[in-house]
Amino acid sequence: MSTPPLAARSPLSDGEWHRPHPLTPLLRGGLFLVVVVGIVIANLRDRLVDIFLPWFLPDEDAERPRDPLDYILSHDLVLLALLAVLGAVLVLVALFWLSWRFHTFRITGDDVEVRSGVVFRTHRRAPLDRVQGVNLTRPLVARLLGLAKLEVVGAGLDANVRLEYLSTPAAEAVRADILQLASGRELGAAVTSAAGARTWAGGAADTIADGVTGIVMGVEEPAEPESVVHIPPGRLIGSVVLSSTTIVILAAVAAMIVGASVGTPWILIGLFPMVLAFGAYTIRSVTRALRYAIAPTDHGVRIVFGLFTTVTEILPPGRVHAVQVRQPLLWRRAGWWTVTINRLSGTRSGQQASEAFTKVLPVGTRADAERVVDLLLPWLTAEQRDLVFARGVLAEPGDDPFTTTPAARWFLRPVSWRRNGFRMTPDALFLRRGRILRSLAIVPLARMQSIAVHQGPIERMLEVATVRAHTVTGTVYTGIGAIERLDALALFAEAEAGAIASSARDRTHRWYAAEQEQEQEQEQEQEQEQGREPDGGTADVPVAVTPERPDPVDLTSPGRTETR
């Protein structure tokens, strides 16, 4: 078996401490600058109108309110004001420089570390063997400057480590290095010397030129595999219009109009902010998915989304804790589906703060959803794939492989009792629910943390129970109710044994090493089939039985191969 050559490391991944791009303080302190500029404009608005829009001013004789600039000019304080402005600028530059000077990071073979702070120092560390993903975020201003923010998603509360900001080429190279190390593979020599790391990070003029060129010419994205799903803008807009949120807002607007027409016009006060909120929601949903792309890579699934703020996420193997395929009622005629996942976010507020990373397919056809599920769960067999759509969400006619709610307890799920059920396989637990809102959840047993059976007083009387598979917190509900008690207990025991066995053989946390082990096992099996020992030697040749040798050699003994 030939081992591929070691991947070259970037100068920023040499295990030494490095500083981010010099323009980082400008982006991190951008909100403060916006507030200062807003205060200045608010206090000098009349003077600015006088300079740029003089035709909007009143007559010469009209009295105008005085502003701070009038006071400075009338008291001959121009020089003092300029010195004050210069001092403020110097103090601001000094603070930004100190912030950049004390902000360092390094990437070793085991961790990604970041140190920051002048007065209060912080030191954050993300172990590479617990990396749940690597996100590359480029806000609009950062894209104009040719910069990007790298976020290493860790396993734990508030465990993310951010490298902000780097030039886009440096961020791409560092992300590749982190994924290589997280896979269990070492890095080769640096492409340039360590002394050239500063040049590699890029200067301010170079990054700004590259950023503007990338946006104008459309060449800012590196060469990546083509997306397996393409979402037309019309389908995207239609999915937002036909969403349940739209229906609720339209119903609320209609109720307000009816209430105003019968004598309560004050209720229209709440109509305007609701329309604004709905418009903002629609625009955000559409712009987020206009550049959506998903494709397989050597280090997992690559997901790209965002029109103004572009986010590129790499989801390594084994980081998906649950998958849900869902089809709302209003999407059924169009044949649209959506796919969401449960994954560790590493943020302080849990999965709710990373909602953008849970919807891996905003809207797509059945073929699109099947491709996405195959990317997220590549180990699914043909029979298990059939459990997702044909036998799962769609429940096509035929023998139903799912264990559903007992017919005698149909009143617990009067609409969907035939569809409410589960199916257990050696690798995953499939949970099917709903008739109006069709959904199917897939829980990999290797990612399942625990399983519980709940039974309240009414459920005990009806001899049913609720089963809940515990995973990381997310939008995918991994429970099923109204299941016969004996079926629930059997599922509990089977899932417990299956989770232990799946976790024991799971090697996805170091996917490169796991691939190497699998290739070695396959090679050994091929050698044994060809009549060779695993070490490359030939098998013993069987000895023929003759009268001079009454004791024949046992050809089926261990270490020998029977040939015919």
Image (cartoon, rainbow, N blue to C red):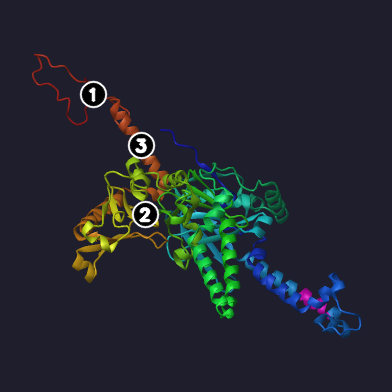
* Residue 72 x %, y %: 84, 82
Where's residue 438, x and y in %? 39, 55
- Provide the residue designation for mark 1: 540
Q: Which residue is mark 3?
A: 520
Instruction: Decide: is 521 above or below 457.
Output: above
Quadrant where the C terminus sits is: top left
Residues in magenta, as a range? 80-87
- Give the vertical position of 561 relative to 44 (above or below): above
Front residue of this view, candidates 243 and 352: 243
Q: Which residue is mark 2?
A: 441
Residue extending furthest toward the front = 262
Identity of the amino acid at label 2? Ala
Disc nearer the start of the sequence (2/1): 2
Quadrant assignment for the N terminus: top left
Give amino acid for label 3: Gln
Q: Earlier in the sequence, mark 3 or mark 1?
A: 3
